[in-house]
Each structure stands twice: as C-alpha cells, then as structure tokens.
Amino acid sequence: MPRRIREQQIIDVAVQVFARRGYHPASVDEIAELAGISKPMVYLYLDSKEGLFLACLRREAERLVAAFQGAARDVRTPELRLWAGLSAFFAFVAEHRDSWVVLHRQASQLSEAITAEVAQARRAVMAEVAGLVRDGIGEAPGPVPVADEEADFVAHALVGAADSLTDWMERHPGESPERVTRRLMNMVWVGMRNVLAGEVWAPPADSGVPGPAASAGTPGTSGAPRAPADPDRSVQG
Amino acid sequence: MPRRIREQQIIDVAVQVFARRGYHPASVDEIAELAGISKPMVYLYLDSKEGLFLACLRREAERLVAAFQGAARDVRTPELRLWAGLSAFFAFVAEHRDSWVVLHRQASQLSEAITAEVAQARRAVMAEVAGLVRDGIGEAPGPVPVADEEADFVAHALVGAADSLTDWMERHPGESPERVTRRLMNMVWVGMRNVLAGEVWAPPADSGVPGPAASAGTPGTSGAPRAPADPDRSVQG
DNA sequence: CCGTAATCTTACTCACCAGTAAATTTACTC
DNA sequence: GAGTAAATTTACTGGTGAGTAAGATTACGG
C-alpha cells in the first residue's frame, strides 16, 4: 500500500476519532487500530500525535475554504457572492460534520503550533467574509467609505452566527442549508447595510432607564435620511 | 480555613488553570499547588477532576446568567432589554475572561455529565435570548405571530455572533463592551425585525446566476409594504 | 536469487497523572 | 485537657498512552 494513500486513510480515521473524542482523549492506538495498521506507521508517516492532528486540520481547512471560495467564484454581485459563500458553508458543515467539529471545537487549548494553525485558518475565513462584506457595501448607493474595521466586525458577527447556527441545524434536520442561509441573510442583510452606511440603532440615552419611545431607536425607514458622518464612527482610543 | 472558603479558592485557581490549559492537560496537582494546598483536599471537597470542573462550570455559568438577567431586569421595553442583556454579556466577558474561556471552548469532548451540563447552560442562555427576541418582535407594529422556531433561530444567530465578537474584542482593546453591543444591535436589529415581521431578503431566482438587480432583494424601506404571509414561513417537514 | 529500499509489526520503555490509604495536625467543645 | 470532628499532609498505586527499538515482510531491479 503506497504511502500517500495510507496517509489519507489514516487522516480519514483520525478526523473521525478526534471529532468524537477530542484531541487529548483520542489515542493514537485507537486511530491506528481503526485504520487497520499498527501504531509505528502513524509515527513514521505523520511524525507525532500533534503532526497527525495538524495534518487533519490542514486538510479539512483546505476543503472548507475551497468549498467557500468555489461557491463564491463566478457569482457576479457581491451580495449574491456572500449568499453563495454562506450557503456553501452550511452545506459543507451538513455534509462533513466531523471536519467541522475538528476545525471548530477541538482546536483550542493545544500546543503553540496547533493554535497558530487554527488561528490562521480562522483569519483566512474572516478575511474572506470581510472582503465580501466590504465589496457588498461598496456597491451600495452613495459614497460610503467602509473602514476595514467595520467590515471585520461584521465578518466576525456573521461567522459567529453561522457557526452557532450549525447547532440549530442539527436540531432541525428538515432545514436545508439553503433555507438556513436565506434566513440568516434575511435577518442580517438590511441591518448590515444600514450600519455600514452610517445609519445607527439608537442606544438608550442612559442605560438602565428606558428611552422616550418604544421603537425610538429604529433607524429611518427610507433610504434618504442617512447620517453622513455620525459620532459613533469616529476614532476612539 | 473553613471548607466553603477553601472550595471557592480551589475553584478560583481551577478556572484559571482550565482556561489556560484546557480540561485534559490541566492536572489536579498543579491546581492544588497553585491553590496552596495538597491534592487530597481537592478530592475531599470536589470528589474528582470532573467534579471540580463541573463546579467551575456551574459557578461561572451562574455568574454569567445572573449578569445577563440582572441587566435585563428593570428595563421596560424588550428592545432595550435585549440591548442591556447583550451589553452585560460583553461586559462580563471583558471582565471575566477565564470564566468565558472555560464556559465556551473547554467544554466539548468531555464526559457525558459535563457535556450535559454545558448543553443545559447553553439552552438556558438561548431560551433567555429567544424570549427577548419574541417579546421584542411582539411589540412590533401589526399582528405578527412569531413562531418559537423563528425566535430560536434568531437567538442562535445572535448568541453565535456575540460569542465570536469576543474574539474581535480581544483584538480591539480600545472598544468598550457598550460600543460593541451598539454595533451589533446596529447590524442586526432592523433585519431581525424585518424577517420576524415577514419581510424577506430575496434569494437569487436560481442559485449561481445573479438576479435581475443588485439590491433587488432589499426589503421595502417603509413600514407599509410588508408581506402578510410569505411562503418561506410556511411549515416544512 | 541477491541487495536494498520500501512497508509494516511485535514488544517494549518511560513519564505522567487520577485517585487513595493512612496518618497527623489544628480547632473547638465539654 | 480529654475527646472528637474538621482540616490537612506524605507517600503511595495503577493505569494509560506517547513514543521507540529492532526486526520481519514485501516488492522489485539487476
């Protein structure tokens, strides 16, 4: 059995085991046994338990990013690109549950190298989403200079929401990834455009005491009244 | 030194160690040493490593929920209650970083009892947020029956976004919890009201091919044109 | 059929760590 | 200050699991 194929087999099994047990409780012995080989093979090909986990991480991250980018490519408007990207994300998670578990929850608390790898993958996803957000708003009517920081904020919120919604999906098996995506877009798109365009949701005058009116803070409902430069977007130390 | 106080000391240290190392790599020996006592004390008072972790989990979850609820209480309108709750959440995370790490990232992959505990805490938070969402929309103009499922979806998205934004906060130390909260509300509130009120972001006619107009899907901007009962909200298996 | 370079295994070592037995000190009551 | 209950320690056991040494087996070109 040639090395490359064996490596993939090992990684296949390792992803399952790491997903089920978590990094530390997972034992290399178990992975080797389930892969139908003996332990030293794992060490020969993947160096160490950490090396094995890193290989899993790299392969699955690559797959996820590829799915994400592949979906967004060939879609013209940024708005629809974001839609396509989110859609691909949910579809990926639905189809590769183990990959996502490994990428997501198993990866903190570990050694330097691993956390670095995870952080990098996460940054890559964030950058991708932030790019989509920035582009999407750039096309909005009016000259709207979007600060990178703003787009980054929105990207974090979006990724976090999508992440958490994977749990929701698990409890709603009837929901297709497409429908989940649509709901999220529904929920977020308008508000996102508004905040990035400078509109603001009004916080209470002083916290704790209710403001003058119930829906007082809801932004102007027409496209016209947009605050050109509001105080909230100014720099702050 | 009386038992209750010792227990709290031990839990204090344990939260730090679990947050830094993660559950499995953390050793009871280290916790005992940092707490200035010997290992059998830990076992006498907290039963086992798992018992110790559960105690940490329970205490910190209680604190977080208390902060959340305490902030929302005494605030009249649901919209502002949600604001207050989110604000309290971010403030809590900013102030009790270790608590949040333990509650959040360290808690998967563990034994039955622990995952159950975490799931329960998470469900509690979700229910709280979903309640705020349902109330908040209930007050919206018009007769809007909000399905529990809808509110649950929004709650998941919100909690996930908030969760992820804790990372963003770490990289933006200048940002106050209040400001982060305001930004998130800014981003989400309008869209949330819209989707729950029945307005829809229009997905592309067929995925992949861009729709007729760029911002075509943006919901009507005035309060008037609201779809009374759109197909997307009908039941589906 | 010999050499050599893969592939693959058995059978260990060694360290770490959860959990415990047994004893010892402290504190407080009668 | 005898008695007892809580607080606390030293000094262990037993299991598990990462990593390895040394060798066995297969494949294949000369």
Image: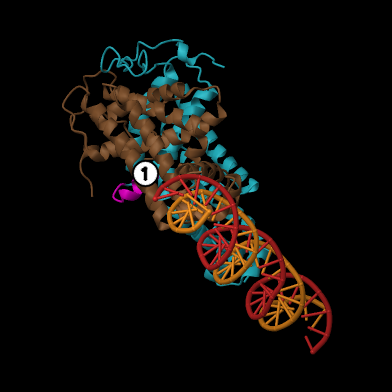
Chain colours: A cyan, B brown, C red, D orange
Give the percent coordinates (x, y) of residue D22.
77, 77
Does any portion of residue A92 appear in the rendered image?
no
Give the percent coordinates (x, y) of residue B9.
51, 42
Q: Amino acid at mark 1?
A: Ala
Most foreground residue, D23 or B45: B45
Most foreground residue, A51 or A131: A51
Find numbered disc 1 in the image and state the secondary structure of the residue it sits on: helix
Magenta residues, dominant SS class: helix
* Magenta span of residues: A166-175
- Residue at x 41% of width, y 31% of height: B89
**Disc 1: which residue:** B121
* Above/below status of A51 relative to A134: below
Does any portion of residue A27 appear in the rendered image?
yes
Give the percent coordinates (x, y) of residue A32.
57, 68
Left or right of B76, for residue A46: right
* Above/below status of B55 relative to B159: below
Report if residue A168 lies within the magenta region: yes
- Residue at x 36% of width, y 24% of height: B84
Left or right of A36, for residue B210: left
Q: Quadrant of residue B113?
A: bottom left
- Residue at x 64% of width, y 68% of height: A41
The 10 Å Cα crowd at callout 1, few under 14, some 14 to 19, many 20 or more, is some
Assign the N terminus of chain A to one quadrant of the image.
bottom right
Give the percent coordinates (x, y) of residue A212.
28, 12
* Above/below status of B15 relative to A223: below
Disc 1: host chain: B
Q: Quadrant of residue A184?
A: top left
Most foreground residue, A13 or B89: B89
Assign the C terminus of chain A to one quadrant of the image.
top right
Report if residue A210 lies within the magenta region: no
Q: Quadrant of residue A88?
A: top left
